[in-house]
Image (tube, grey):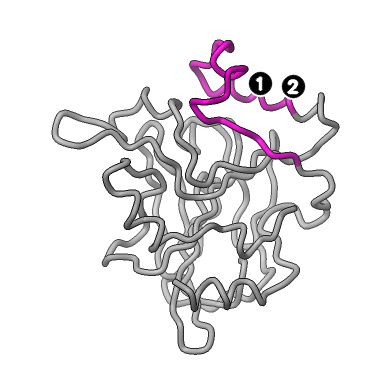
Amino acid sequence: MEKIIALLGNIQNIKVISKEIDYTDYIALDLSVTNENLANQKLATAKDYQQYIQNYLESNKAKIAFGGYIEHRNLYQRSTVFKNENTDERNIHIGLDLWINESAPIYAALDGKIHSFQDNSALGDYGPTIILEHEIEGFKFHTLYGHLSLDSLKDKKVGNFVQQGEQIASLGLPPINGDYSPHLHFQIIIDMENKTGDYPGVCSSKDLAFYLKNCPDPNLLLKIN
């Protein structure tokens, strides 16, 4: 864990969405259960969240809202992807979300190759997803890009090289993106645990200790102030 933190800390000037938007136009967004303002909103559909986030961006004169790492959220309760009779409820978000209410280009965070991709099409899931594999100083890890457009999966081949800053996808819109307000789910994953095209982006409290080690804070890389 110390090694990945040190490696990511030394990397500068990384953007994974809409490069032309400066970090000064970003605003932190709290979607946790502790946000009392959120609790007073009627947020049942993707359209409800889209309006809430648009109002939030406009009131803060911002263009992208970000946040969500290790955030305890209620917004997954509508989907059996995160809870069924045989599993513990998963409601702790282990990636970083970048919310923007429009189509937007998505870029590779670092040099690497396509590890896997697929459309995780269940309600509340990632929708189209791309996972890249990276290696720095002999250390392998992965980045996941979720809630993409279907076109983002066209002509992709496992093993193809991607260059840092290369556009690899575009943002998806509801319902294709899992039926969420438009946003990129960006996640760092050290061990893929033999999974392809998918990896948990939300965990249960019981499993949090493991995912804190396997999925370090993406902002170590992005460095959004």
Residue bearing mark 2: 55
Residue bearing mark 1: 52
Three-letter code, disc 1: Tyr
Q: Is residue 199 magenta?
A: no
Coordinates of residue 95 in the picture (x, y in percent)? 50, 50
Instruction: Identify the residue at horizontal 48%, vertical 58% (top origin).
Output: 144
Q: Quadrant of residue 19?
A: bottom right
**225 and 110: which is toward the camera:** 225
Q: Which residues are magenta?
A: 27-56
141 with respect to 223 (left or right): left
Instruction: Identify the residue at horizontal 26%, vertical 31% (top origin).
Output: 83
Coordinates of residue 75 in the picture (x, y in percent)? 45, 26
User: What's the mark number on residue 130?
Assistant: none
**Vertical side of 42 occupied by 62: above or below:** below
Q: Residue furthest bottom?
A: 137
> Is disc 1 in contact with disc 2, using a CB cutoff of under 8 Å?
yes
**Vertical side of 150 occupied by 158: above or below:** below
Coordinates of residue 88 in the picture (x, y in percent)? 22, 36
* Helix, strand or loop status at disc 1: helix
* Helix, strand or loop status at disc 2: helix
Q: Quadrant of residue 41?
A: top right
